[in-house]
Amino acid sequence: MDLHLKNKVALVTGSNRGTGFIIAKALVDEGATVLLHSLEAGASDAAANDIPGAIPVSGDITSDAGSAELIAQVKATSLSVDILVNNYGTAESGRWQTSTSADWIDIYQKNTLSIMRMIQAFTPQMTAGGRVVNLGTVGSQKPNSRQPHYYAAKAALANMTVSLAKELAGRDITVNLVSPGLIRTPEVEAAYLKRAKVENWGDTWEQAEAEITKKYAPNPLLRIATREEVANLVIFLCGQPASFINGQNIRVDGGALDIVN
């Protein structure tokens, strides 16, 4: 399927590592020009070496000053952003009775206001066919008792996605949210393999994945999503064939959720 991404310019936040890196690589493979972003100066340069043609940019988008730095760097490229993938976000541990106001504000800066800043900066100049894809979590609809501040911030992002789709009405720009469950990143694999060895589920991911899934991310497919599986949905939503998908929260969880919208 031709996604018609050639000559498109995409900014993928937090794309120097993890799932964002895979998304950036997939977009380049489809012919897009990708602005590969990191919070810290220099971190995107090393990552861009592994994606020929990617353009490194940086700026701590969890603050107004850092966001301004990134916006200035993008402007300096003379490129106009057609596709904005708000991939950056982070989870942090916390409990209801111990998380402070500062913890809640900090996680909101990282998972909600960082995205608001990018939307305000880059959607005004988007032309017809533009795309905004936000990365959320299934926890925005099915939160756990732990990490309440994180899930609340991601729930706000789900609300923002629908609001922005309405705000951009008539401009032929789509806005969607991709909400993965647990993703098999190198960090996740290493952490859960340690637990698997304690539980005697096996020494390799192949041996232990089914039990890890049952315990920590139960779903009918009995495995964890790969980064590529999440990226495949993101880049599809960036493409022309997805031109009538708008304002949606699409889960990538192997069928884990038992709620119906």
Image: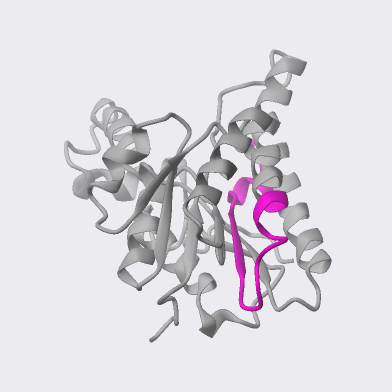
Q: Is residue 221 left or right of residue 234?
A: left
In the rendered image, residue 88, in percent from the top left (x then y), is placed at 53, 43
Residue at (58%, 49%) from the top-left corner? 137
Residue 105, can we see it?
yes
Q: Is residue 139 left or right of residue 35?
A: right
- Quadrant of the snapshot with the C terminus: bottom right
Vertical comparison of 114 with 123: above or below? above
In depth, the one of 240 and 185 nearer the eye is 240
In the image, is residue 39 part of the stretch drawn in magenta? no
In depth, the one of 182 and 237 nearer the eye is 237
Residue at (35%, 32%) from the top-left corner? 42
In depth, the one of 217 and 49 nearer the eye is 49
- Quadrant of the snapshot with the N terminus: bottom left
In the rendered image, residue 51, in percent from the top left (x then y), is placed at 26, 54
Q: Is residue 196 left or right of residue 161?
A: left
Say which quarter of the image contains residue 204. Answer: top left
Vertical comparison of 53 with 196: above or below? below
Residue 145, can we see it?
no
Q: Is residue 19 left or right of residue 201?
A: right
In the image, is residue 139 part of the stretch drawn in magenta? yes
In the rendered image, residue 162, in percent from the top left (x then y), is placed at 77, 62
Residue at (45%, 82%) from the top-left corner? 4
In depth, the one of 161 and 187 nearer the eye is 161
What is the residue that sits farthest to the left in this orientation? 203
Stretch in magenta: 119-148
In the rendered image, residue 188, in percent from the top left (x then y), is placed at 36, 37
